[in-house]
Amino acid sequence: MNSVLIQELVKNQLKNIPEIKAGAHVRVHEKIKEKNRERIQIFEGFVIAKKHGKGINATFTARKIIDGIGVEKTWPIHSPLIEKIEIIKTPKIGRPKLYFLRRLSPTKIRKKLSVFKTILPESTPILENEKKDSQETIIEEKTETNS
């Protein structure tokens, strides 16, 4: 009985977020409260660790270097203070924790993590009729340039 009730409460608090992996270059939009106003602050860096699975307790740690000083922040993935998480690039790295990046310089970090595949925004699907129309215009342009 209690576990069912807890599962129902947890379901309402879970967010639909993209898959975050260690090494991913992310942009986290975080709500910051200052006196009586609220604003969104963006933190952009590399994920060095993801802990505690996928449930309500899941957290991730992101790191970036500001003016030569390493800054790390850890957030609960399903926190209400996180507005959104954008994944800029994803890694092809097999390690779950990248703590060794702490002792490297920014240029060495870029070299280590240069094996990325870029995430492209989803494009709208092209219908078959549109494909035919675009092919016909290309053929027409080629014939006009040839004559």
Image: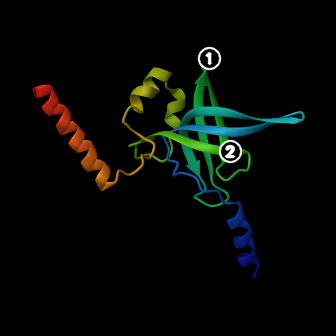
Position in image of residue 58 (x %, y %): 63, 54
Point out residue 69 in the picture as x, y percentages from the top left corner. 62, 21
- Residue type beneath disc 2: Glu
Image spot of residue 87 (x, y percent): 52, 42
How far apart in space, not on screen, are marks 2 and 1 (Cα)?
A: 26 Å
Q: Secondary structure at mark 1?
A: loop
The quarter of the picture where residue 38 lies is top right
Label located before the other in sequence (2 or 1):
1
Q: Secondary structure at mark 2?
A: strand
Q: Quadrant of the N terminus?
A: bottom right
Q: Are marks 2 and 1 in contact (CB under 8 Å)?
A: no
The answer to which of 78 and 38 lies nearer the viewer is: 38
Q: Residues within 10 Å of mark 1 (few under 14, many from 20)?
A: few
Q: Quadrant of residue 44?
A: top right
Task: Determine which residue is flagged by label 1.
Answer: 67
The structure residue drawn at horizontal position 67% and vertical position 57%, both measured from the top left corner, is 57
Which residue of the protein is positioned furthest toward the left in this rendering? 147
Q: Residue at x 71, y 64 (%)?
A: 12
Report which residue position mark 2 lands on.
Answer: 83
Name the amino acid type tagged 1: Asp
In percent of the image, x 53 and y 51: which residue is there?
Answer: 18
For this orientation, the residue located farthest to the bottom is 1
Which quarter of the rendered picture does the C terminus lie within?
top left
Q: Which mark is residue 33?
A: none
Residue sitting nearer the eye, 127 or 111? 127
120 horizontally vs 140: left or right: right
Left or right: 40 as drawn, with respect to 45: right
Q: Position of residue 104 (x, y in %)?
A: 49, 25
Asked if residue 94 lies left or right of residue 44, the reply is: left
